[in-house]
């Protein structure tokens, strides 16, 4: 089967399309994804999910979806000390193309950088330090890369930026952006994944929200949101769940002054939610966990 796939892919290499790089930056703080959160990602927005982030129990890493997405690996049998598939750690300037091993990876479950069960990092990973990993999307024949970090103390994968070549089987240089980094809007992030990654707050709205506190967190029956609003623009408060569905919106916009808001979470399912403080100056997002 793989030989047939390789043959058909080799034929497609003769196609000549104009290459275009699709690049996304997640800002200075990156996109934080908790262990076991199982975030599904559709890299090229073709309606077919390509891989999961932190989709394997108690591991930080990536789980390809069979027939769609996979990551580069040294060879067909390379595994980590805790049994996951070994992810190749690339250097800036490496070229990702059909010569890089990706074809066997898709049959081997997952590639992870850290296991909480064994409290071990895979070879080449250092907690909190950025690494480049490369991927290939079978369905669309596109190569790409991500700059990521394994945050072991906080049990998160942090994705800093990613890019893929829109040309069918077009090679891509690891770390090359092709443009100045820009933080995507909420809409473009929603297209990237069924999970809505929180937008990066602007400095102006950070200054407007003073003494902000969200408690208890995790919440059970209710959550309190307290802050001193110093802005002149009206502020709305919206809460969405991990797939971007709105579960709360304040009935009236907030004006300048002290705000003490109590929200009932009694009917919400357990999981991760995002509280969005939004004005004309931008959006600040706070993470909320609900545990029943």
Image (cartoon, grey):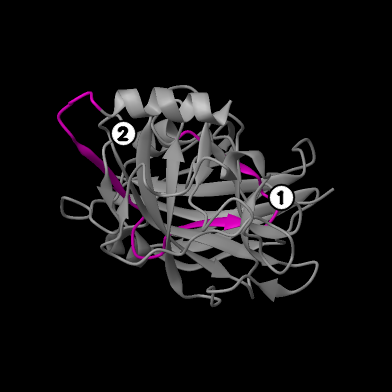
Q: Position of residue 119 (x, y in %)?
A: 74, 74
Q: Which mark is residue 169?
A: 2
Residue at the right extreme, as displayed:
292
Write the start and end of the magenta stretch as one range: 14-42
Q: Nearer the viewer, residue 265 or 202?
A: 202
Crowding near the residue tagged with mark 2, few <14, some 14–19, many ≥20 C-alpha atoms within 10 Å: many
Identity of the residue drawn at 61% across and 32% down: 66
Q: Position of residue 92 (x, y in %)?
A: 29, 65
Q: Which mark is residue 69?
A: none
Q: Position of residue 75 (x, y in %)?
A: 55, 54
User: Is 19 in the magenta?
Assistant: yes
Identity of the residue drawn at 59% across and 50% down: 76
Earlier residue among tags 1 and 2: 1
To which residue does mark 1 refer? 56
**In what quadrant of the picture does the N terminus appear?**
top right
Identity of the residue drawn at 38% across and 32% down: 44
Looking at the image, residue 216 lies above or below residue 126: above
- Residue 221 in sight in this render: yes
Crowding near the residue tagged with mark 1, few <14, some 14–19, many ≥20 C-alpha atoms within 10 Å: many
Q: Nearer the viewer, residue 71 or 260?
A: 71
Q: Position of residue 182 (x, y in %)?
A: 23, 51
């Amino acid at each position: 089967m793989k030989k047939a796939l390789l043959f058909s892919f080799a034929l497609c290499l003769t196609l000549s399309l104009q290459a275009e790089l699709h690049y996304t930056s997640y800002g200075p703080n990156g996109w934080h994804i908790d262990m076991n959160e199982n975030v599904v990602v559709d890299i090229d927005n073709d309606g077919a999910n390509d891989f999961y982030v932190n989709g394997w129990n108690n591991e930080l890493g990536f789980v390809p979806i069979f027939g769609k997405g996979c990551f580069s690996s040294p060879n067909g049998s390379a595994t980590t000390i805790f049994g996951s598939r070994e992810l190749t750690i690339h250097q800036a300037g490496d070229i990702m193309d059909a010569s890089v091993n990706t074809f066997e990876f898709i049959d081997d479950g997952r590639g992870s950088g850290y296991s909480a069960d064994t409290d071990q990092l895979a070879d080449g990973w250092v907690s909190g330090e950025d690494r480049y990993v490369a991927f290939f999307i079978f369905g669309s024949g596109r190569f790409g890369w991500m700059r990521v970090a394994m945050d072991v103390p906080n049990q998160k994968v942090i994705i800093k930026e990613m890019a893929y070549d829109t040309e069918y089987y077009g090679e891509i240089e690891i770390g090359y952006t092709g443009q100045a980094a820009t933080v995507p809007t909420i809409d473009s992030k929603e297209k990237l994944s069924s999970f809505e990654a929180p937008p990066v707050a602007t400095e102006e709205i950070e200054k407007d929200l003073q003494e902000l506190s969200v408690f208890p967190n995790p919440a059970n029956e209710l959550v309190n949101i307290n802050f001193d609003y110093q802005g002149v623009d009206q502020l709305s408060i919206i809460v969405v769940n991990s797939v971007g569905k709105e579960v709360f919106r304040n009935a009236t916009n907030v004006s300048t002054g002290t705000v003490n808001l109590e929200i009932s979470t009694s009917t919400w399912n357990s999981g991760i939610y995002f509280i969005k403080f939004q004005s004309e100056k931008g959006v600040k997002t706070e993470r909320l966990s609900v545990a029943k």
